[in-house]
Image (cartoon, rainbow, N blue to C red):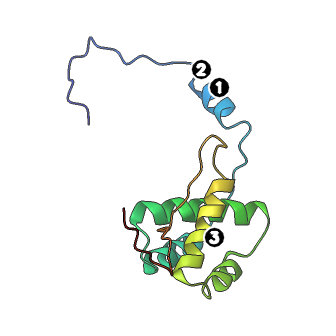
Amino acid sequence: MSSITDKSINKSTDSATEVKSFFDRYFSKSISITSNEVDSMLGFFKKRKFDESAAIAVTTVLLQQAKSENKNIFELLDSLKGLEEVKLSQLVAAILNNNRSKVSALGYTSDYQVVTYENRNVIL
């Protein structure tokens, strides 16, 4: 409900609103996803300790990709269940990088330590 009660203020109507919304969606293909598919995929990633926003982002990308390739989402989830946390994180990073702009990429690092087996004393 609007807090403005002045009748002299008119809301502007743009006759091109429908046209703009049509062309904004012109090149994007609409897909339909059931709520149980979304809930299952989101719950899968939340159960594996993904943050809320990360789980939503990964779920969105995986659902779009599965629908575009006509893959069953529940078969995809069954194949992901066998992965360890590290392998799952690597797979998710690779999937997200494939669906991102090529300007940036997601990654991770591991501690690099040089193990030396010989120690020498040098006298100056």
Between 72 and 122, the one nearer to me in the picture = 122
Frontmost of labels 3 and 1 is 3
**Residue position for label 1:** 19
Residue at 68% x, 30% y is: 23
Q: In which quarter of the image is the N terminus?
A: top left
Q: Which residue ends up furthest to the bottom in the rendered image?
A: 82
Return the disc, 3 or 1, that comes first in the chain's sequence.
1
The residue under label 1 is which amino acid type?
A: Val
Name the residue at the right extreme: 69
Toward which corner of the image does residue 52 lie, by quadrant? bottom left
Question: What mark, if any, has residue 91 been given in the picture?
Answer: 3
Residue 3 placement (x, y as % from top left): 20, 29
Q: Name the residue under label 2.
A: 16
Task: Give the residue type that dot 2 points to.
Answer: Ala
Q: Is residue 47 above or below residue 102?
A: below
Residue at 64 percent across and 64 percent down: it is 63
Q: What residue type is labelled 3?
A: Leu
In the rendered structure, are the residues bearing label 2 and label 1 in contact, judged by CB atoms less than 8 Å apart?
yes
Mark 3 and mark 1: span between their CA atoms?
Answer: 40 Å
Horizontal and vertical percent position of residue 102 = 67, 43
Q: Count the numbered circles shown.
A: 3
Residue 42 is left or right of residue 61, and the answer is left
Residue 7: image quadrant is: top left
Place of residue 58 in the rendered image (x, y in percent of width and height, measured from the top left):
55, 63
Label 1 CA crowd tier, 10 Å (few <14, some 14–19, many 20+): few
- Circle 2 SS class: loop
Q: Is mark 3 on a helix, strand or loop?
A: helix
